[in-house]
Image: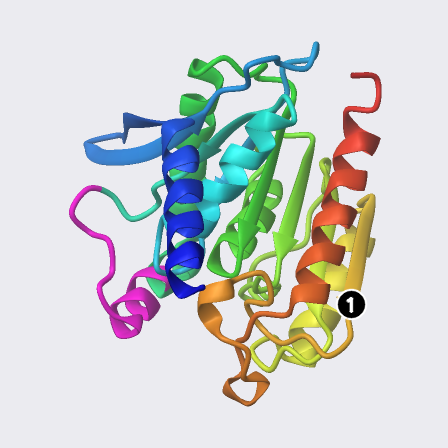
Amino acid sequence: MKIKLLLFTLIMALQVNAQLKPIAYKDGNAKLNGFAALPAKPLKQKPGILILPAWMGINSHSKEVASTLSGLGYYAFVADIYGEGKSPKTTKEAGEQSGYYKGNPELYQKRIQAAIDALVASGADKNNIVVIGYCFGGTGALEAARGGLNIKGVVSFHGGLGKDASRPNSAVKPKILVLHGADDPYVPQKDIEGFQKEMKEGNADWQMVYYSGAVHAFTEKEAGNDNSKGAAYNEKADKRSWKHFLLFLDEIFGDR
């Protein structure tokens, strides 16, 4: 039984990797290495989905998401935020590197824009882009909206919602979807309240969905299933959030 499961996992991994194309691109002098997943049958609007990975950088989950989206007709691209040779090897390193970009949002926005440019270069329509992200990447998706990037929507899966209080709230043009674990210990209530205030003051078209029993990283199978650690996979929340995400895409790209 274990051998069959191992073979199935290996086959799935090979299928995902076969659909992904490594892409070298740049942000100024920084060398970046992302992955593009091109649809065999693109939707007529040629929409593109930029995927911002969690704090450990590009992983199997982000690649699987890209592959799945390309199968639905979307151009998908997994962004490299940290750059060549800078992928964190430990959670300590991940915390330090992700913290740097959180503390320098304009650099995070610029790095995201470089990935959007690479997504457009792969074939996506520059006026039909949605940015999604997981954990640290979810924070980045919101930063794409705050930075006024040319995008139609953003989706944050269990991402951080807070921003420095010195940053003023401004108009929010893209549609916003936040998918949030109701028991997430890493997103304090003050950040939730601040985010909702930001959305209201920005006259945003926004939604926030809570999933009961879910903590941080509820879409990440590698997080295990122990909620007491604060980050854990939750199958029900994972499936529900994916459906909510697809409904969001249908709303944005309804005439496909």
Q: In this view, does 194 lie above or below 208?
A: below
Residue 150 in view here: no
Residue 145 in view here: yes
Q: Farthest top residue?
A: 44
Which quadrant, please, contains the C terminus?
top right
> Residue 158 lies in magenta, yes or no?
no
Residue 181 position in % (x across, y down): 69, 71
Name the residue nearer the viewer: 87 or 126.
87
Residue 197 position in % (x across, y down): 77, 63
Q: Residue at x 80, y 45 (%)?
A: 204
Which quadrant, please, contains the N terminus?
bottom left
Q: Which residue is drawn at 82% across and 55% down?
A: 200
Question: What residue is pinned by disc 1?
Answer: 210
Residue 94 position in % (x across, y down): 31, 65
Q: Is mark 1 on a helix, strand or loop?
A: strand
Q: Is residue 252 above or below residue 147?
A: above
Residue 195 falls in image quadrant: bottom right
216 left or right of 83 in image: right
Q: In this view, does 219 lie above or below 59?
A: below
Residue 212 position in % (x across, y down): 77, 75
Q: Which residue is drawn at 60% across and 45% down?
A: 146
Q: What stretch is highlighted in magenta?
A: 84-98
Name the residue nearer the viewer: 5 or 193.
5
167 left or right of 209 in image: left
Q: Amino acid type of disc 1?
A: Tyr
